[in-house]
Amino acid sequence: MSPDEIRVPGTSRVYSRRRILIVLLLPLAMALIAVSAINVALPAVATGLGASDSQLQWVVAGYALTFGVFLVPAGRAGDVLGRGVFYVAGVVIFTAASLWCGLATNPTSLNIARALAGLGAGFMNPQSLGMVQQYFSGLARARAFALFGMVISLSVAFGPVLSGTVITWLGPQLGWRASFLVNVPLGLLAIALSLTWLPFQRERELWRSRRTVGSPTEKIDLDPLGAIVLSASVASFMWPFMTKGSSARWIALPLSALLAWTWVVWERRYASSGRSPLIRLELFSLPSFAYGTAISGLFFLGAPSVFVTMAIFLQSGLGTSAMIAGLIGLPNALASAICAGYVAKRVLRTGPLIVVISVIAALLGVAASALVIYGVEHWGLSFWWLLATLGLMGAGQGAFGAANQTLALADVPPEDGGAAGGVKSTAERLGTAVGVAVVTGVLFSVGAMAGWTWGAVAACLVNVAFLLLSLIGSLRDWARSHPREAAH
């Protein structure tokens, strides 16, 4: 049997790791394109459906909330009941929701469809990470996560380009619909490939145990109360950062902290009673997982919102088209993809030092972007210099994604891969929600007082501050794993 092949225990079936990766990467690209494309499409949605500002806000917030809330419960369910079936369910939900988005006749209908799309993405994401943990190891796992990093970078950058190009070709009435509908044929292809190429190993084991006469029936424990309490805590935390209006919404933050404390107490008691908790809290005693999750959450505080700033500055501040606003991010994606592949071959040998270097590169790229934005107005620079600065940032992002994903999950047992991946992805979603809220708040408030240039510069400096926090965390992780080198 070749290294690429996987034999399912107890059967004669042989599956290809390469094909499994293709199945996992296609829906991942769809979900991330949906995240990034919407920022460019929002003005067209407002024109096409007559949506108010608050309704447009929920086009983004509804997707992000359901995505973030269901990551850990879906990951745990996949670990227990089988990742393949939950992955396919997520693709089905996401594809159907994309069709609904493209055919929506009013803002309410669109927002419901976007929330369902977030649910589908929340089902898919932790299963992808769990299956990489399950079917890959060592250098093969690092390469798989590098491919994840490449697809993430290219998808996030390609989304605005795709959306801006389609809207430019078809006009605001039809263009935004086409940017959703393009996911439908891709989703149908992903469903067909999933049913054909995924092993469904855990599902087959459960099915055989139930059909075999006299065999002990495995007890299924999903810890439903733990899932509900944790989901409520995540939703409460994200809510005030993703909505606008009354200041009373900030009461949700202490409520989130109380729910998180309640969840930890419950999980400890649940585990001490001999049952299987939603997440084994012992995972957080793994330094690689704890540091990797924290560093990634801090990195996502500072990185994703950069592109929101650029899109708003270029379109509202400089009056460029949606397509140009999207094209600015292409070098970022290409540099990210190249560096992710480069890092994959070296991360197991170099370790956390690569994470440190990658965060520094991203930080310098954002700082240089702030300098270019200032120079456009005061020195007569062309805004196309952002291609270079965002490219530097992309190099850091790609290297960070591949290295951090590999190192953070390196010591996690395969049977906990989905739940652990869900925890890490949740930290990233929380970081993104807070980062976008804070950065756009600074952008609009400073912009209203001093103009778009100063608003964008101030927003970039906030991103730099957030990335500095991630750098401090990565330096501590490097010092922990290489105390002698760090001391010198």
Image: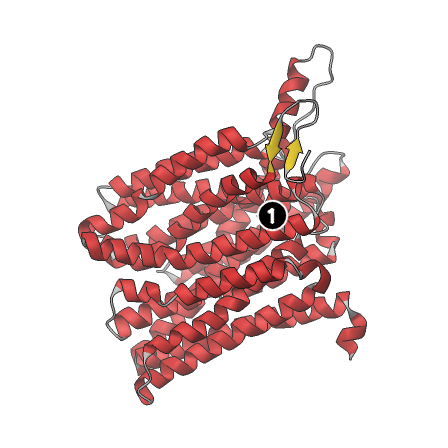
Query: Residue 244: horizontal and vertical position, in percent?
Result: 36, 60
Quarter of the image where the C terminus is located = bottom right
The answer to whether residue 297 is visible is: no
Q: Residue furthest bottom?
A: 379
The picture quadrant where one finds residue 3 is top right
Q: Is residue 22 left or right of residue 57?
A: right
> Which of 224/289 is in front?
289
**Image: 472 above or below 25:** below
Query: Residue 106: horizontal and vertical position, in percent?
Result: 23, 44
**Image: 283 above or below 200:** below
The answer to whether residue 158 is visible is: yes
What residue do we see at 53% from left, 51% from top? 234
Query: Residue 219: horizontal and vertical position, in percent?
Result: 69, 25
The amino acid type found where label 1 is placed reads Gly
> Which of 429/174 is in front?
174
- Disc 1 marks which residue? 421
What residue do we see at 74% from left, 18% from top? 216
Q: Is residue 23 left or right of residue 479?
A: left
Q: Residue furthest top?
A: 213
Quarter of the image where the N terminus is located = top right
